[in-house]
Amino acid sequence: MIQDNLIKVGMADLNVAHMTGVLKTTGLGSCVGLTLYDARAKVAGMAHVMLPSSDIAREGTLNIAKYADTAIPELIRRMVGLGAVKSRMEAKMAGGAQMFAFAGNNDTMRIGPRNVESCKDQLKAYSIPLIAEDTGANYGRTIEFDCETGILVIRSVQQGVKEL
């Protein structure tokens, strides 16, 4: 993938691109890398979601990019500001792994699966179709999303390279 217009998205971060650029985030374990894309407007967005809900936020100033329920609305808002239309948006996502095995059925420790569920709930609430995903399992991922093509490239040590 061309690296000239690389736009890094950090952990608990989000960013958008218009016409050109590749959005990239690394270190997806239990976190979810969610992308939205309006192919007609060539507007793309990516969020690196760490936790499912801002209800559990404890910090003084809320980092809206950290939580699925606040990051996705903000991503939509920023993309619309660049000319995207919500009804034309499609989503792809990767990550949401269960990196460690825990004894028992403690829902608190299921961060990866809960992140995936929360992202899907948000997409459903905004009527944005999820057209592809590579989630779950127990390995880390790095993703790159090309604003011109809408192709999501997923890299992992154990699984190699995939395109969605």
Image (tube, rainbow, N blue to C red):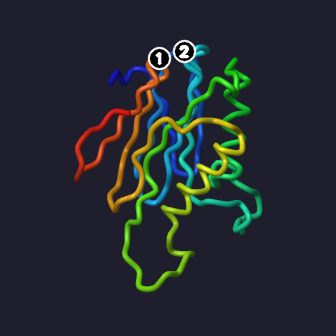
Q: From this view, report whether residue 96 is shown above or below residue 110.
A: above
**Would you name the residue on which mark 2 appears?**
19
Report x, y in % for residue 61. 76, 57
Report x, y in % for residue 139. 32, 58
What residue sits 74% from the left and 65% below the top? 55
Residue 2 figure quarter: top left
Q: From this view, report whether residue 140 is shown above or below residue 92.
A: below
Quarter the N terminus occupies: top left
Cβ atoms at labels 2 and 1 below 8 Å apart: yes
Report x, y in % for residue 118. 61, 56
The Cα atoms of the two marked residues, 2 and 1, are separated by: 6 Å
Q: Secondary structure at mark 2?
A: loop
Q: Nearer the viewer, residue 3 or 125?
A: 125
Residue 66 figure quarter: bottom right
From this viewpoint, which residue is outermost toward the bottom?
104
* Residues packed near mark 2 inside 10 Å, few (<14), some (14 to 19) or many (20 plus): some
Q: Which amino acid, by three-letter code, is at mark 2?
A: Met
**Would you name the residue on which mark 1 appears?**
148
Q: Nearer the viewer, residue 100 or 66?
A: 100
